[in-house]
Amino acid sequence: MSLLDYFSKDGFRREEFVFDTIAPVYDFITMFATMKYSKAINQLRKHLPIGGASVLDVGCGTGQWARLFKELGATRVVGIDLSGRMLARARRSYPDIEFYKVNAVDMRMFEDNSFDIVTASFVLHGPDRYNRNRILSEMIRVARVAVVVHDFDSRPLPFFSRLVENIERSHYRDFQASFLDDLRQFGYGVRKVELRSHLALYILNKRMRVG
């Protein structure tokens, strides 16, 4: 890939380029965000059992979010990502987790209801609304019990977070404005759990139909 990919109209090419480029320093850049993973997962455990579950982590990056599910007793954890360089770091760090290079808009390698929990952390604010909903549709199709999204809520982002998102050319503002409504449109029960600062857990329960 080249710098031209950063200016591509194809958001996924741009995303792959950005994350391949920052892979060597990604954990440092996101250090403050990943420090909040443990607090988020502890909140999640109050609403959803993790021990004994199978888990798919969409947009797993270097594997930091995925490994928490493994540490809490998930029997199988799989991570997928667009960035080969991020995945290479993940495989070195967490050899007991499966990692695959997959674009989440098309997860045909996984059958319907393949995993108890399908999750994404700091991922879905990146794509535009059309592709975000394509990814959500695939996540819901593959999930047996729940979809869990750990991401921004509607509160203003701190300066550093805004800076990073603008460099990545993400669609975080649209995500903040529309994500909860988009999640509810699929017709399942949705719970939003606010976390500190500007973050939240969104939990979609496939066992609860609404409407």
Image (tube, grey):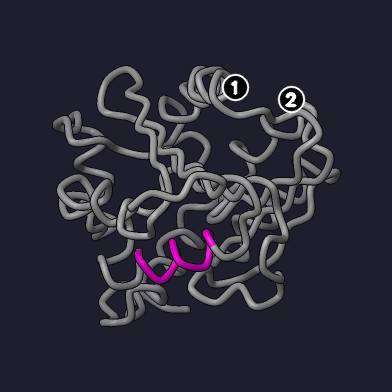
Of the two numbered discs 2 and 1 on the same chain, state the one appearing first in sequence. Answer: 1
Magenta segment main secondary structure: helix
Q: Residue 40: tell me if it is visible.
A: yes
Label 1 SS:
helix
Q: From the top left corner, tell me how far across and down residue 140 is, in percent.
A: 52, 59
**Residue 121 shows in this picture:** no
Q: Is residue 108 shown left or right of residue 160?
A: right
Q: Amino acid at mark 1?
A: Arg
Q: Secondary structure at mark 2?
A: loop
Of marks 2 and 1, the one in the foreground: 1
Q: Which mark is residue 72?
A: 2
| Residue 4, image quadrant | bottom left
| Callout 2 amino acid | Leu
Residue 75 versus residue 36 in the image, above or below: below
Identify the residue shown where x is 32% and y is 24%. Answer: 194
Taking the image as shown, residue 140 lies to the left or right of residue 15, namely: right
Magenta-tinted stretch: 133-140
Q: Which mark is residue 182?
A: none
